[in-house]
Image (spheres, grey):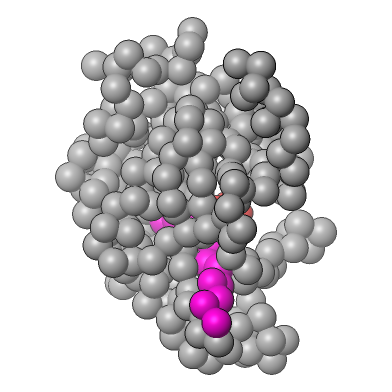
Amino acid sequence: MGRRKDLMARRKKIYEGKAKILYEGPEPGTIVQYFKDDATAFNAEKRDVIEGKGVLNNRLSEYFMSGLNDIGVPTHFIKRINMREQLVRSVEIIPLEVVVRNTAAGSISKRLGIAEGTALPRPIVEFYYKDDALGDPMVSEEHIIAFGWASQQDMDDMVALALRVNDFLSGIMMGVGIKLVDFKIEIGRIWEGDFMRLVVADEISPDCCRLWDAKTGQKLDKDVFRRDLGNLADAYTEVARRLGVLPENNVPRGKPTLIN
Ligand code: UDP
């Protein structure tokens, strides 16, 4: 235990975000992602600590990322280390949030006046420029290419990647009675000599998806926190339980209760 503490103390922090801390990994080109219990919304205007959220998101992100790796959709994920940490490849993050929508909700409903819950005619891919000070504004392909955030080839590859993630996640979710309304991913570059490839990075968890119970429409994602609809950890536990990723003896201590 003493040795482990020493190692933790010596580890170099690279970046602390709203929900995760990144540390230098054990090998060059690797990073340790630590999942915090902090929840934020509305550009961090609303914040709270949700006991057990980090443990759940670490598990859920492992489940989705390793599933993607298994079907040949490249991600940065290497392996989970413990309850709150996972080892990932270090990537150069493209400064865009890539959102895929199957059903109208959230900002598209507000902006275009489409009732929440309306099925979209096809999956819609949107891009937002990652800049907290600007509130992550939506940008078009024109902006992205003109400002050099990504090339035309990158754009085509990002859309293809995002749609493959959408098909995979929608299928998995539908199998456990959950509708994947929309989600956000981040994409990074990995350099191998002169060759560059794009991989899914960051995390895939109910923090960045909208998940509705297929029958009742009950929300099982971060909107529970954003809109004060109940206990967020209970909602995420329900998603984990349905997917079979939370062995019952491994439920975060003291929290939350399983819904059966
Ligand atoms: N999203 C996210 N991080 C952000 C913004 C959005 O993970 O900074 C996710 C959000 O959880 C939802 C999807 O992207 O699953 C679409 O979000 P939307 O544009 O509707 O924005 P919101 O309603 O969250 O402001």
Q: Quadrant of the N terminus?
A: top right
Q: Is residue 161 visible?
A: yes
Quadrant in the picture for residue 68: bottom left
- Residue 40, image x, y percentages: 66, 38
Q: Is residue 191 magenta?
A: yes
Q: Is residue 113 visible?
A: no
Secondary structure character of the magenta stretch overall: strand
Which of the 4 quarters of the picture holds residue 169? bottom left
Left or right: 186, with 3 as reference point: left
First to last magenta residue range: 182-193
Residue, far front: 3
Quadrant where the C terminus sits is top left
Residue depicted at x 57% and y 20%: 51
- The residue furthest right is 133
Please tell me which residue is depicted at 29% across the width and 22% down the height of the picture.
247
Horizontal side, residue 145 vs residue 255: left or right: right
- Residue under the point 24% across and 49% down: 172
Q: Is residue 110 left or right of 119 when viewed as pictured? A: right
